[in-house]
Image (spheres, rainbow, N blue to C red):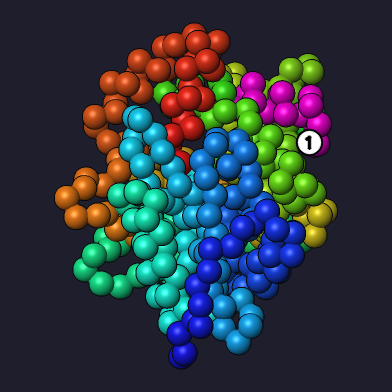
Amino acid sequence: MNPAEAVLPIDIRGEADRVAIAAYVRAHPQGTPFHLPAWLDGVEKGTGHRAHMLVAERGGRIAGVLPLTAVKSLLFGKAMASSGFAVGGGVLADDAAVAEALIDAGWALAAKLGMPSLELRGGAMPTGGAWTLKTESYAGFVRPLAADDEAELKAIPRKQRAEVRKALDGGLTVEIGTGRADRAAHYAVYAESVRNLGTPVFPKALFAGMLDAFGDDADILTVRQGGQPVASVLSLYHNGTVMPYWGGGTFGARALRANELMYFSLMRHARRRGCRAFDFGRSKPGTGAFAYKKNWGFEPQPLAYAIRTADGQAPREVNPLNPKYQAKIRAWQKLPLWLANILGPPIARGLG
């Protein structure tokens, strides 16, 4: 394998480069939405964190990409992340030699910009003692979509299937769109959901930035009871896979089985769009979200992450399961929603 002839920082604001990078990502079997210029756009516009894209070339063609976000936070420190605010990303390359060149260039860029660490969330993994590899922190959940609604129901284990059937008969309605009303409903539901979990909500601008950047490859599905939103999810679509990314429900959603209707309706909607797979995202083993996804018939697959930290620097710590955050989480759960929505975005903007 010949190494990359060059690794270049590319300005993703140039239309020709954007098109070429997006085409490479979509053609690569390991490409994800988090490798696309659109993702970097959404993060930068929604949070203010600077986007960077490294592109490896060989023979005048793109041979690999490394999308990066320079995350800066007074509370959580600084880090170069691939990709920022994503569950995936990392190096996307034709072969190991190109991947190594991109990893080296990513670390050099992080040092140049004063970033004490580089986080690779998936993709080709680096080698060498300078890197810490983690495969036990998160698991991903992906499975094929069934041919129709009845087959989809049969793919769900019996107990969860009964809950879905009750949700389908519960008198709730479903709306799908990307307009102002869809965005407002989604944010209201999502903000309440994460407050109840004890975590700060992301800024509205992040969701708006993603919807605007992805265009037809993103939408919002909202479940309503009597016209009031009770569950909502913002999803991405990539190469025949639907990814419900930011979703949640109100306090009353559980009794209404609104989340069950939301995810089953999204499976139906995605199938109509021509999708072939459902990516339920990542979860930490031992959590309720991990168990919930298994209840739907999804089998967990370990996700590989890597981090390198400069000598003498402590790794950035943003894991909500860390015991040092538990008292803060309990306090946050008690905040009035209006106050959590004011205080949350400036904090969550630094999570990256």
Judging by the rendered image, the residue that carries numbered circle 1 is: 178
> Is 134 left or right of 219, judged from the image as shown?
left
Magenta stretch prevailing secondary structure: helix
Q: Circle 1 sits in a helix, a strand or a loop, which is it?
A: loop
In this rendering, the answer to whether 234 lies above or below 274 is: above
Q: Is residue 184 magenta?
A: yes
In depth, the one of 77 and 226 nearer the eye is: 77
> Is 15 left or right of 347, judged from the image as shown?
right
Q: Is residue 114 magenta?
A: no
Q: Is residue 167 visible?
A: no
In depth, the one of 104 and 179 nearer the eye is: 104
Residue occupying image coordinates x 42% and y 17% = 333
Mark 1 surroundings: few (<14), some (14-19) or many (≥20) residues within 10 A: some
In this rendering, the answer to whether 65 lies above or below 3 is: above
Q: Which residue lies most toward the bottom here?
A: 1
Residue occupying image coordinates x 58% and y 42% = 44
Residue 348, position as x, y percentages in the image: 46, 30
Residue 340, position as x, y percentages in the image: 49, 16
Residue occupying image coordinates x 61% and y 58% = 11
> Is 250 left or right of 14, judged from the image as shown?
left
Residue occupying image coordinates x 17% and y 50% = 312
- Kind of residue indicated by mark 1: Thr
Residue 196, position as x, y percentages in the image: 48, 21
Q: Which residues are magenta?
A: 175-190
